Image (spheres, rainbow, N blue to C red):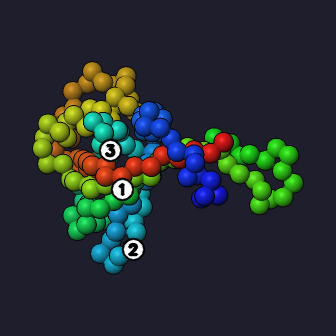
Amino acid sequence: MRHRTKNHLLTQEQIEALFKRAEVGRIATLNKDGYPYVLPMHFVYADSKIYVHGLPKGQKIDNIKSNPKVCFEIDEMISLLYDGIEEPCDVNTEFNSIILHGMATIVDDFEEKRAALSKIVEKFTPHLMEKELPVPMINGTAVIRIDIEECIGRYYK
């Protein structure tokens, strides 16, 4: 199927719409032994960048400090395409997906962290947007910014 998806590229507008509606993406880093480490994470797309947040310690943080190159993936399965299909290997999937490569940075700037966390609150809990983010929470949360270097969106239907 790979050869067919070369002709099924999402437009920039479709990519941005998928970034906005998707709730979970997967960040891939490399650990010290060279193995991929993939985590599903809530994220927000803002200013043409991806922001994720989490604990300030752990394998993801260690991996990024060692090698900031990351891959980030988002997908949505719309349906299985099996009407009129008689062979299992002929079943296909209607989907949208994005795969990007970029450089991850652990954000140290307080205002950038606050802005990114506010955008995450706006996306996932908009009813809490009026609440002030506590300074200790901002300081104690790791915010990772992914500067996108390459981004490909694909679909099939």
The front one of 28 and 16 is 16
Residue placed under numbered mark 3 in the picture? 50
Q: Is residue 38 above or below residue 117?
A: below
Say what amino acid the circle numbered 1 marks. His
20 sits to left or right of 5: left
Residue positioned 21% across, 64% down in the render = 65
Q: Name the front one of labels 3 and 1.
A: 1
Residue placed under numbered mark 1 in the picture? 101
Q: Residue 114: x and y, percent?
A: 19, 36
19 sits to left or right of 120: right
Tell me the SS state at disc 2: loop
Residue positioned 30% across, 32% down in the render = 119
Tell me the SS state at disc 3: strand
Crowd tier of the residue under label 3, counting other residues whose Cα lies within 10 Å: few below 14, some 14–19, many 20 or above:
many
Say what amino acid the circle numbered 3 marks. Ile
Q: Residue 139: x and y, percent?
A: 16, 44
Q: Is residue 101 visible?
A: yes
Disc 3 versus disc 1: distance between alpha carbons? 11 Å
Q: Tell which circle, 3 or 2, labels the residue nearer the N-terminal end.
A: 2
Q: Is residue 90 above or below residue 47?
A: below
Disc 3 versus disc 2: distance between alpha carbons? 23 Å
Tell me the SS state at disc 1: strand
Q: Residue 11: x and y, percent?
A: 47, 38
Residue 35: numbered disc: 2
Q: Tell which circle, 3 or 1, labels the residue nearer the N-terminal end.
A: 3
Q: Is residue 18 visible?
A: no
Q: Tell which circle, 2 or 1, labels the residue nearer the N-terminal end.
A: 2
